[in-house]
Amino acid sequence: MNLPSFLWLWKIAAWSMGLSLLAYLLLAITGIWMFRARISLQKPSFIPPFIGGRREVLMLHYIIGSCIVSLVLFLLLIGIIGTLGHFGSLGHSPHLFAGLTVVALVLLSAGSALQISAERPWARPIHIGANIALLIGFTWVSLTGWSVVQKYLP
């Protein structure tokens, strides 16, 4: 079958992955800010004045979290479309399992984040644990993704 080049799709995936990693870093920073603010019960001195108090940091954290969920789901869609379009089937490398693991961890993190409250003390450890596991997942998906990219480059 004479299919068009999927190189444009992989460029979009590369940008999306880069933005996902940037969002993960920003989420870690804002998460640490909120943790330190909760422990000290005051605004940490290292928070820039333009960010504001704990409420503003929390809203920023939610906004960035929504972005990472959207980016990861978009990456899943790109991966499925691109792989089916290029190979005709899925499962040609460990990248599929790595990607599905990252998607599951991001959704677990987002779902548990929405549950965090004084009435649900179990949600915060799940959220933090999922985010620590996500660091390993992002590393894994990046390494397996690099091998996949090599298959598509001319």
Image (spheres, rainbow, N blue to C red):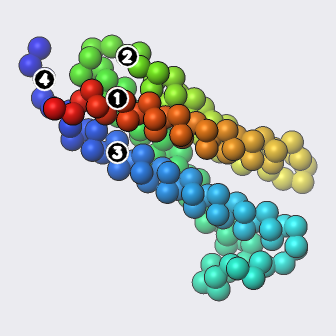
- In the image, what residue type sits under mark 3? Ala
The residue sitting at 61% across, 38% down in the picture is: 136
Q: Which comes before the other along the chain, label 3 or label 2? A: 3
- In the image, what residue type sits under mark 1? Val
Q: Which comes before the other along the chain, label 1 or label 2? A: 2
Percent x, y of residue 40: 88, 73
The residue sitting at 53% across, 40% down in the picture is: 139
34 or 56: nearer the viewer: 34
Tell me the residue that label 3 is attached to.
Answer: 14
- In the image, what residue type sits under mark 4? Leu
Q: Would residue 43 appear left or right of 30 to someone viewing this image?
A: right
Disc 3 crowd, CA 10 A, few/some/many (<14, 14-19, 20+): some
Percent x, y of residue 75: 41, 38
Residues at circles 3 and 2 in contact by the CB criterion of under 8 Å? no
Tell me the residue that label 1 is attached to.
Answer: 148
Q: Nearer the viewer, mark 4 or mark 2?
A: 2
Residues at circles 4 and 1 in contact by the CB criterion of under 8 Å? no
In space, the residues marked 1 and 2 are separated at their CA atoms by: 9 Å
Asked which secondary structure carries label 3, the reply is helix
116 or 148: nearer the viewer: 148
In space, the residues marked 3 and 4 are separated at their CA atoms by: 21 Å
Q: Nearer the viewer, mark 1 or mark 3?
A: 1
Asked which secondary structure carries label 1, the reply is helix
The residue sitting at 28% across, 38% down in the picture is: 10
In space, the residues marked 4 and 1 are separated at their CA atoms by: 18 Å
